[in-house]
Amino acid sequence: MNNPHKNRQAELTIRAATENDVPRVLEYIKKLAVYEKMVDEVVATETLLHQSLFVHKAAEVLLGEVNGTPVGFALFFQTFSTFVGTPNVFLEDLFIDEGHRGQGYGKALLREVAKAAHARGAKRLEWVCLNWNAEAIAFYTLIGAKPMDEWTLFRLEGGAIRNFIRS
């Protein structure tokens, strides 16, 4: 996915993360957590990320760089739709460094994820967005995404998973 994207400011290069990029991926996860006011929820480590991304291949990461300087990342994985009968792609995270926002880098990264989804036969590319992130919501609406207001996200985590298993 070494797909350069021209930008009015500079040339953006998007590439798949490698094992050597694990520290950078964790750094971006932490930056996103700061932005989303969820720093206390980050428990990922370089070891866990390496296992998940490169041993189990549970997700993929694209990195955006301008002149070799990182500017953002996208992390995504494959899901499946029983109703449609095809694979889908779920975008877990998309983040652009503050000083590089508004220059088309996020859109370029999202486009690369969409290309990967399309190449795999996915009929849907889905993600969640925090309700307070009006700027992101406006962007997603502008590119043709629609909110799925009739669905509510549920989550079991940690002790709740263990409790449910034992019940």
Image: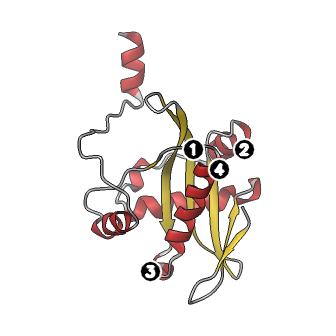
Task: Identify the mark nearer the N-term, 2 or 1.
Answer: 2
**Image point (30%, 52%), residue name:** 147
Task: Identify the mark nearer the N-term, 3 or 1.
Answer: 1
C-alpha span from label 1 to label 4: 14 Å
What number is the disc on residue 119? Answer: 4
**Contact (Cβ within 8 Å) of mark 4 with mark 2:** no
96 displayed left or right of 157 = right
Q: Nearer the viewer, residue 96 or 2?
A: 2
Q: Where does label 2 land, which residue?
A: 54
Image location of residue 89, percent across then percent down: 53, 45
Q: Helix or strand or loop: what does disc 1 sit on? A: strand
**Contact (Cβ within 8 Å) of mark 2 with mark 1:** no
- Give the label, 1 or 4, closer to the camera: 4
C-alpha span from label 4 to label 3: 27 Å
What number is the disc on residue 77? Answer: 1
Image location of residue 19, percent across then percent down: 75, 53
Image location of residue 8, percent across then percent down: 56, 89
Q: Helix or strand or loop: what does disc 3 sit on? A: loop
48 displayed left or right of 18 = left
The quadrant of the picture occupied by the N terminus is bottom right
C-alpha span from label 2 to label 1: 13 Å
- Give the label, 3 or 2, closer to the camera: 3
